[in-house]
Amino acid sequence: MFKALDPILHSQLRLAVVSLLISVKEAEFTYLKEKTGATAGNLSVQLGKLKDAGYIDIHKQFKDNYPLTLCKITKKGVDAFEQYVKALQTYMKPDATE
Amino acid sequence: MFKALDPILHSQLRLAVVSLLISVKEAEFTYLKEKTGATAGNLSVQLGKLKDAGYIDIHKQFKDNYPLTLCKITKKGVDAFEQYVKALQTYMKPDATE
DNA sequence: ATAATTTGGTTTATAAAATAAACTACTCTA
DNA sequence: TAGAGTAGTTTATTTTATAAACCAAATTAT
């Protein structure tokens, strides 16, 4: 009846990050921080989890002397997002008869 | 950009319970347990939280000598669910341009 | 009659998650 | 060169979710 919700994506911040990365393909740490309104610490932790899950790739480099963290969604991340949305829909259109 | 997700509803089990109650209006503890696949302990805790939030009403009575817990969604619960779905939609159709 | 099992839960304890606070390392500005 | 800012990470705290243990009464089996 109800499909299980991927715990990696069932987090407001991680879901927001994945949602952003699906539309922009690549984003800087600071961009994600600004768009999501998250604190840097929380974002850092959640990006690490998304990376560990293989949902995003993280490339660290330097730009104008400053560290720069770039994030990109992976195929696995896109698939997981699509599955998550499908699963959510089983909760959103209530129907007791199945 | 992203709307906040009501933490009361952002729980797989509580969301499933509210989803069920919206379609059936009133349900027994055991029905909810069976439909959600939750353990009794977990369900008991989560029903308590939904009640504390004012999203459901719980009436305890006896039926055929056994205790019977009946749950009903409240207006507040219906409203919260609708808001939650709206908020989720801001995550589901990715659009970086706002 | 009484022991074991089942029903319908609640309470307590443990594990996992989210969040906040503190810290690191470096850079820029006055 | 002291102070503030950038770009994060790490650690600690709080909150959640889940599981395990427990409870009271009813039923069934012996």
Image (spheres, coloured by chain):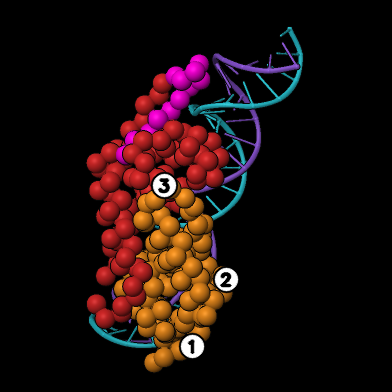
Chain colours: A red, B orange, C purple, D cyan
Residue found at the very far bottom of the displayed protein: B64
C-alpha separation, residue under disc 3 versus residue under disc 1: 52 Å
Residue appearing at x 51%, y 57% in the figure: B4
Q: Quadrant of residue B92?
A: bottom left
Q: Residues within 10 Å of mark 3 (few under 14, many from 20)?
A: few
Amino acid type, label 2: Asp
- Provide the chain ID for the residue under circle 3: B
| Secondary structure predominantly adopted by residues drawn in magenta | strand
Residue B66 within the segment the image draws in magenta = no
Residue appearing at x 44%, y 33% in the figure: A28
Residue B25 position within the rendered picture, expressed as x and y whole percent measured from the top left? 42, 84
The numbered mark, 2 or 3, whose residue comes first in the sequence reads 2
* Residue B97 seen: yes
Q: Which residue is mark 2?
A: B52
Q: Quadrant of residue A50?
A: top left
Q: Quadrant of residue D2?
A: top right
Residue B77 position within the rendered picture, expressed as x and y whole percent measured from the top left? 50, 75
Residue appearing at x 27%, y 53% in the figure: A82
Q: Nearer the viewer, residue B16 or A70?
A: A70
Label 1's element?
strand
Label 2's element?
helix
The numbered mark, 3 or 1, whose residue comes first in the sequence reads 1
Residue A71 position within the rendered picture, expressed as x and y whole percent measured from the top left? 38, 34
Amino acid type, label 3: Ala
